[in-house]
Image (cartoon, grey):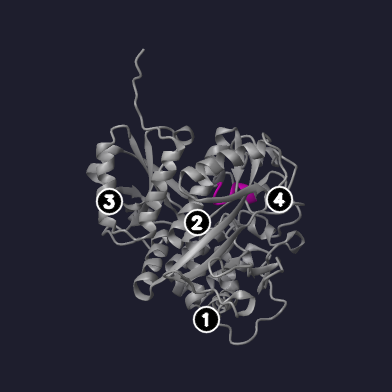
Amino acid sequence: MPELRDFLELHYDELEEKNLEAKSMRASRTPIDKIQEARMKYLTDEKRIKAVTVCFSDLEGRLHMLDYDKKFLLKSADNLTFDGSSIRGFSAQVESDLRLGLDWSAFYWLPSDVFGPGKVFVFGEVLEKDGSPYPGDLRSVLKAYAAKLYETQGLTANAANEIEGFIFKGANAEQRYHETGGFDFISTSGYYHSLPGDPIRNFIDTAAEVQRAMGFANEKDHPEVAPSQFEMNYSYTEVSIAADQIQLYKLICRQVANRLGLTASFLPKPAVGINGSGMHTNLSISKGKDNLFYSATGQDGLSDMGWQFINRILNSALDICLVLNSSVNSYRRLDPHFEAPNEIKASPIDRGSMVRIPIGNEKSARVEVRSVAPDANPYMTLYTLVKTGLEGALPKAELPRDAILPDNIYDAINSFAASDYMSSLLTSEVRDKFAALKQASADRCPRKLGTLVKASEIMFHHEVFNQSLWSMF
């Protein structure tokens, strides 16, 4: 019987080549009209593509995806709309219609064995009815700020994120937590320790291959300290690309795990008595080929600019804590008994510090913000850290040596909601909407964390959230 469907399926080496080329065009700031023309011509000429997956992120950082028929998209790319009132933190029901623009520079070819054949992937930009950027779309805010830095000062903000996660037995383990009361590990080994063919190594190998095919420029991967915990590292890149890669990293992990009958979880602390998961965020600023954070004679190899960047972040630590740790569960991770980075200080060696200064040279000198949780909105996080580091207020006096981050979300919400700085950074409307979302989740959870992870921490977590779970309250 003849094959009835001929959908696009590319070998991994061809995928990597295409995705790296697209990434290079974006990083080199190829004019967007030139990229758009090339992508639309490709979609027109490539008959094996059936649909284009367009994605965007809500205010909490949850990824949303819509599939558009290719022929429809080509005709209607400048007039895509969706109902914003269905998205937590977006427009109210009475003003629900929003537009969806396409960022043709953020275009990806997908491995067909993981995502299905015949589809390509592009990031979208949420727009108001009149076509202006929607203030709750932090992706657009970050992208605009990065462009302004480059256009006005010639500066490029760079980021690399070390994203930890857990793999649990069974699909949808987070959504079923209120029924099961716990997670089942697939491995009880630990740091760097796994054998070829182990379940966790099988997952890591598969996910790492997908990452590589999608142009991540992999560096290393390994099981982490805790049972069933993993980390897959990749190279730094321009900050807006880096934020997209965080979303892709988590999407890849979830999709690969689901295909294996498992669950990839980015809860900061899904189980007590073991290490939690972080998203150590490495940042640097460059101008041309020069790393402006490097100084051969500076303290710990950092320039004055690098230290000012750190001090501005430390000075605003309480204001920005909710951005970096935006869930009830994330405050379990800020526990000093498990290498928690909860001390408001910087150090080259003390891993309990909020900021670490890794060993570096003129190429790799950077600042590592360790207090970021893996469930933070990547666009809000990177925008907040970069702009605070460059433009925030420097401390007027030496910071107290015993200053620590909050150990519960309520204190973090209070600091965030009362902060004039966060209002100026995000706008008061976005600040208040974000605080309200976090308060609504916190109100569904016990005020005191206690020693055991509660079902409500999982059920009402923004990455697990669905209408059915939310209605169980």
Judge by depth and name the residue closer to the eye, 168 or 243.
Answer: 243
- What SS does tag 3 mark? helix
Q: Residue furthest left?
A: 75
Tag 4: residue type? Val
- The Cα–Cα distance between marks 4 and 1, rounded to whole angstroms, is 37 Å
- The Cα–Cα distance between marks 2 and 1, rounded to whole angstroms, is 26 Å
- The Cα–Cα distance between marks 2 and 4, rounded to whole angstroms, is 21 Å
Q: Report crowding for label 2: few under 14, some 14 to 19, many 20 or more residues within 10 A (C-alpha).
A: many
Task: Please report contact status of discs 2 and 3: CB closer than 8 Å, yes or no.
Answer: no
- What SS does tag 4 mark? loop
Task: Please report contact status of discs 3 and 4: CB closer than 8 Å, yes or no.
Answer: no
The quadrant where residue 430 appears = bottom left
Measuring 38% from the left and 50% from the top, which residue is drawn there? 21
* Percent coordinates x, y for residue 74 in the rendering: 25, 42
Q: Earlier in the sequence, mark 2 or mark 1?
A: 2
Judge by depth and name the residue closer to the eye, 388 or 237.
Answer: 237
Q: Residue furthest top?
A: 1
- From the image, tell me which residue sits under label 1: 393
Is the residue 1 above or below the residue 414 in the image? Answer: above
Measuring 52% from the left and 39% from the top, which residue is drawn there? 255
**The residue stretch that appears in magenta:** 457-464
- From the image, tell me which residue sits under label 2: 60
Question: Mark 4 or mark 1, which is nearer to you?
Answer: 1
